[in-house]
Image: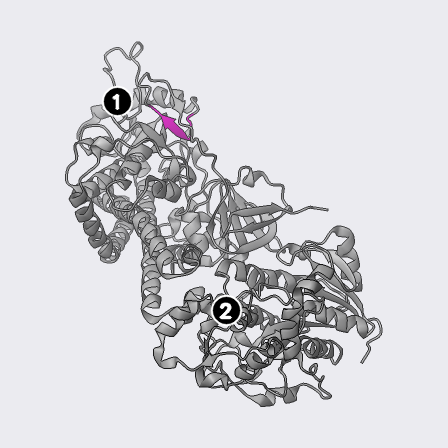
Amino acid sequence: MTEQATEQPRSVEVSVDTDAHPYFRVYSAGNFGEVAPQRLSPMSWSLVGDPMERGTRALARRLWGRPAWAEGGHYVFVGYFGCRPYHNLAAYCHLSASIPGLQPSDVTDAYFEGIDSPEELTALRSGRVRQVAGSAKLLGELRDTGPRLRSLEERVAELEWGLRAATTTDSPIALAGVLRDALPVLEEAWAVHILTTSGLVPVTALQRRVYGKLLRHGKEIAHWLTRPRELVWDRLHTAASTLDPFGPGDFLASSFYEVADNQAPWQDYAVRHKQVAGGSGEASVAPIDPAEALAGMVSPWRGRTVRSLAVAVGEMMAGREHSKSLAMRTLHIYRRLLPALASSMGGDADLWPYLTIREFTELATRPALIERARPRIEACRAALATPMPEHLDLTGDDGVIRPWLSRTPQGLRGVAPGVGTGTVMTPEGDLPDDPAIIVCSSADADIAPLLPFAEGVLSERGSDLSHIAILSREYGIPCVVGYPGAASLPAGTAVSINGSTGEVNILDPS
Amino acid sequence: MNDPGMNVLILGGSGFLGTAVAQACERDGATVRVLSRSGRTAVGEGVRGDVRMPRLGLSSADLARVREETTHVVLCFGSVSWTSGPGEVLETHSSGMRQALAFLRELPALRQAVHISSLLALGRAKGRVTNRELYTGQRFRNWYEYGKYCAERLVRDTPELPVGVVRFGPVLGPAPRGGRPDTRHGLPMVFPHLLAGYPVHLARRGDFPCWITDATSAAQIVLKALTTPIGRSTWTWFDPAMPTLGEVFTEVCRPWGVVPKIVEAGPLGRFTRLIGERVGAPKELTEYTEPWFDLDVNVLKEIPEPWPAPDPDYLGATGEALRGGTERRALV
């Protein structure tokens, strides 16, 4: 965060914005725009953007050495402008050039709703040998994701137990101990999330290519076969139903990403809330899976190759969701911990949403750090009053906020296959008796409990590897994204969606 | 046989078998309504709709009439292509079937529905199969077989509905609406290849049953299933003469004066398939060159007698229709 001198606060402009990257200056809310609140408090940014940046830098270093463009005091892969979190679209597209066979469009299709990618800076491209070596290292890292996630799950559970003990004994020292232990866990959770999120792009691209070579209708079959076998969300929603305030599912009742979701003005942006469907769904007999059906249509070695790739991609999708859930659980620990610690410190510590986590951690020994929060209040207020575009073009370098416009119009995209028809329902609405299509502006794991009862999902936002796409695949229901105005379709409208082709039909109400 | 007041809705009634069923029902005195995406029909009343849509995509006027009057339904829609991908096949056989079954629940006067399934839903079933089996751990040769399996699975899982299942093998014979038989899909794909004089590999030179039947007798069986009624049973029908696959090829080629070149080139294995593909035989066809499955022939006895007699020489008539197709199509 940039802060000019604070000697004369009235005359000096204070900003919470991060510095833009000197070369890669096109940003996009991308996946943040789908799942995170539109604006984040400085504290939440320090718990989300900062570890994401560290995790991505560390991954890039391990894979491709230390390219000059990925070094420096500025953020490289993320940005925080006008209190809105962004991904650095240009930097991520540049990363795609570091993996043989990958195109920038693979990245934008996967996480940026298929917008056009910025021009590539070819001078910064790494050599062929480094590209191949980096890809091999990436596969090695992905192979080890499972043990890392299991170990991380244990550490998060320990933190939750620690928070329970500290809260029930009302011990500030124990709370401070949890605070100390939580940051490495959070950083590890985001690091694994970055790894699985990044790794999915080349692996799905490889899958499409291999299927195209080995199978007739290869791309279509990839759509049908790639399903995570079991996502973590079911387990967490079951845990949430116990209403244990320190249980692993408690975070589902809160806003994802925003830890200050009980404080103004951040509560206005905290859009997520839990939806738990009641009753038990009609047990439908599941026909055998398309993946099994395919086994007889191809030779054994082709079948094994195809299945292995489908399982690998499915497992990585599951790993992506698992790592995200662990990051969210750790954020939820902060959500409970920070107000409790702030009240134990007394004074102005309730300004904690305007501090970063490192400043807050040092507050006990350096109380003067609280002064950093005060000018940020006004800066945040001004930022929140400024509309921030979905895609941000900072190439002008004149401080003017310009939207970055994609030349190619974004169309409808089928991201989970199948055909679904039903009447529309919003995630907040009651389940209708008729088959329902969930319509929303964007969706996250909070709608997972509704999916067994839905015939499909129609979303305004989303990409090929969005969380909602992965969840829909798990439940075997179609999902179409990129439909403007989906959330505002009147209740009772009958709609038919085709998740294979992206076709959407609003049916004649007469 | 005539059931007074029988009002039959045929879903997918503009296709090959659907037309034959519509003709049989109309001849039997039933009121016939044919649902298709074009809304056109050669028999009975055509209504425009789409099985993939809720309430079959019917207009409100058609919906009210169909709901009120329909007493019998025949489900014979869906992709028949052996070369389609999963998306196209499951769009109708799975999603469409679910919509169709949901619609059947809304018919207050429904007495009997019949789902026209395929013996190919059994795929490469191991062991002897009867009407009872659907999934025996079999492997599927193509997405069509899987689609038919999914459709029958869905029908079997609706015990609250009076839907019976009638299974057929390949259905041949001249197209009920006239014109040249469609050789783009299913077993007829092989005929242009055979008639052009190319050799075809068949295990045991095709001396194994292919459970074939003709469109006329198949339509009569569907009518019988509606009127008997079949209830929730499963029937299987094939030509009781049980011509072998080799005999079928020979008979279809006879009007052309062509003797099909059936060879047993099994030891050549993959090479045979590659040659076949090079000369235009779809890969999917080569999956049917071995005996398909072991079907218990006694399944026929579950159909109440008298059984319809297949048209005499329907195989020769199929070949003849292929010859005269150009002129007839012009007439149609």
Which residue: 71% across, 84% down? Answer: B309
Which residue: 34% across, 44% down? Answer: A332
What residue range appears in magenta?
Answer: A388-394
Residue B326 x, y percent position in the rendering: 66, 63
Q: Is residue B89 visible?
A: yes
Vertically, is A156 above or below B267?
above
Judging by the rendered image, the residue that carries numbered circle 2 is B146
The disc labelled 2 sits on which kind of residue?
Tyr
The C terminus of chain B, quarter of image? bottom right
Q: Marks 2/1: CA distance? A: 60 Å
Residue B261 x, y percent position in the rendering: 48, 79
Q: Which mark is residue A2?
A: 1
Residue A107 x, y percent position in the rendering: 34, 42
Q: Nearer the viewer, residue A66 or A35?
A: A66
**Which label sits in the foreground, 2 or 1?**
2
Q: Which mark is residue A30?
A: none
Chain to which the residue tagged by mark 1 belongs: A
Q: Nearer the viewer, residue B218 or A255?
A: B218
Q: Element under label 2?
A: helix
Using a 10 Å C-alpha cutoff, classify the residue at mark 2 as few (fewer than 14 neighbours), some (14 to 19) or many (20 or more).
Answer: many
From the viewer's perspective, tell me whether residue A419 is left or right of residue A254: right
The disc labelled 1 sits on which kind of residue?
Thr
Q: Element under label 1?
A: loop
From the viewer's perspective, tell me whether residue B241 is left or right of residue B44: left
Chain to which the residue tagged by mark 2 belongs: B
> Residue B161 lies in what quarter of the image?
bottom right
Vertically, is A79 above or below B14?
above
